[in-house]
Amino acid sequence: MENIVITGGAGFIGSHLAGKLLENGNKVISVDNFELGKHENVQEYLDNPNFELVEMDVSKADEFSMLLQEKHVDRIYHLAANSDIQKSAIVPGVDFTNTFGTTYSVLEGMRRNGIKKLFFASTSAVYGDKSGVNLTEDIGGLSPISYYGGAKLASEAFISSYAYMNEMEVLIFRFPNVIGPNLTHGVIFDFIKKLNNNPKELEILGDGTQCKPYLYVIDLVDAIVEYSMKQGKGVEIFNIGVDTATTVKEIADMVCRKLGLYQVEYRYTGGNVGWKGDVPSFQYDLSKIYNTGWKPKHNSNESVQATLDSLNL
Ligand SMILES: NC(=O)c1ccc[n+]([C@@H]2O[C@H](COP(=O)([O-])OP(=O)(O)OC[C@H]3O[C@@H](n4cnc5c(N)ncnc54)[C@H](O)[C@@H]3O)[C@@H](O)[C@H]2O)c1
């Protein structure tokens, strides 16, 4: 049993991770400022004596470091970040503080308290728009095109230096799009919201051909827990995902079917990207993680369908 902190622990992925770590007998402290996290995501754990919920802004390094000291923390899963990429396109400081600033606090808190074990939630956005390139973990010349991707790549760089200077054991997964129960943002969520407002017409950003791999959150969380327990000294980076992908138009069709709407008129905003900073498609090379024997249980379309089936529509 370990004392574990999850930053962003009341968010979509963090709350699933908390459930899995509790199931495995750990003590879990979920830290979240509730900017995007929700109390209802962690409601089911509140009666568990091994679970604690702390409302805190993780980017406040001194406060966060005190918490780590008080709780005798063994390991951190750092998931706190701004996940609303469109929001930070307007206010870049959100990513500086919530995506990069939280990483600095986590690393500094670990250094001050002698904590060695870290998992970091990174993203395909660190690669930037490299269409046609097979994205392996060791590819160079990364040029993120969103502030979010920039803050995540800066986080990876800081992690590398802190890990070397302080002999840390760090696992980094670069997530693709992750979906599943309790989803709070992203294209599925947007479509449902729009169709609830107007069931006759659906605005689709771009031309609908943007095509991305969708990974089911339960598959991801199982891998995070399994691989983080095996991590040794240094920093290990894995692309994680599925080798299939789903277009935005296919998602619109699946959402409409799920809502029982068969005569929806699609209105495309045009262009091949959803918004400035969006990467319309990318090709992950997953051989590194596949060679370890890992395989997701759901392909991309199954992840979309399972997510829709899990929602209370
Ligand atoms: N969902 C995806 O498709 C996806 C893809 C790639 C990477 N990721 C990464 O995975 C992690 C979890 O994402 P998610 O989808 O669960 O998003 P989420 O928004 O549901 O979770 C992030 C959580 O971090 C919290 N947070 C933000 N700033 C904070 C701060 N300063 N202090 C404390 N808490 C703070 C938010 O309130 C939220 O609960 C993030 O790091 C995200 O960048 C997610």
Image (spheres, grey):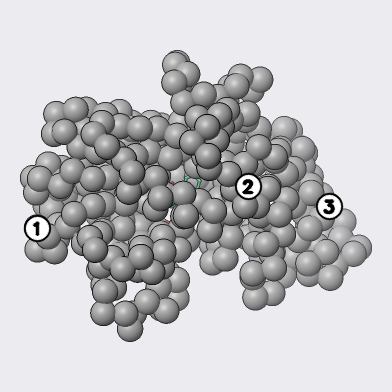
Hey, what amino acid is under mark 2?
Answer: Tyr
Question: CB of residue at label 3: within 8 Å of ligand 1?
Answer: no
Residue 214's mark? 2
Residue 266's mark? 3
Residue lying furthest bottom in this view? 47
Q: Is residue 197 above or below residue 283?
A: below
Separation of disc 2 and disc 1 at Cα? Answer: 37 Å
| Mark 3 in CB contact with mark 2 (< 8 angstroms) | no
Residue 251's mark? none
- Which residue is drawn at the image coordinates 78% and 67% (left, top)? 258
Residue 221 as seen in the image, left or right of residue 64: right
Q: Which residue is mark 1?
A: 69
Q: Earlier in the sequence, mark 3 or mark 2?
A: 2
Residue lying furthest right in this view? 263
Q: Nearer the viewer, residue 206 or 186?
A: 186
Q: Earlier in the sequence, mark 2 or mark 1?
A: 1
Q: Is residue 62 above or below residue 160?
A: below
Question: CB of residue at label 2: within 8 Å of ligand 1?
Answer: no
Hey, what amino acid is under mark 3?
Answer: Tyr
- Which residue is drawn at the image coordinates 30% and 32% (left, top)? 235
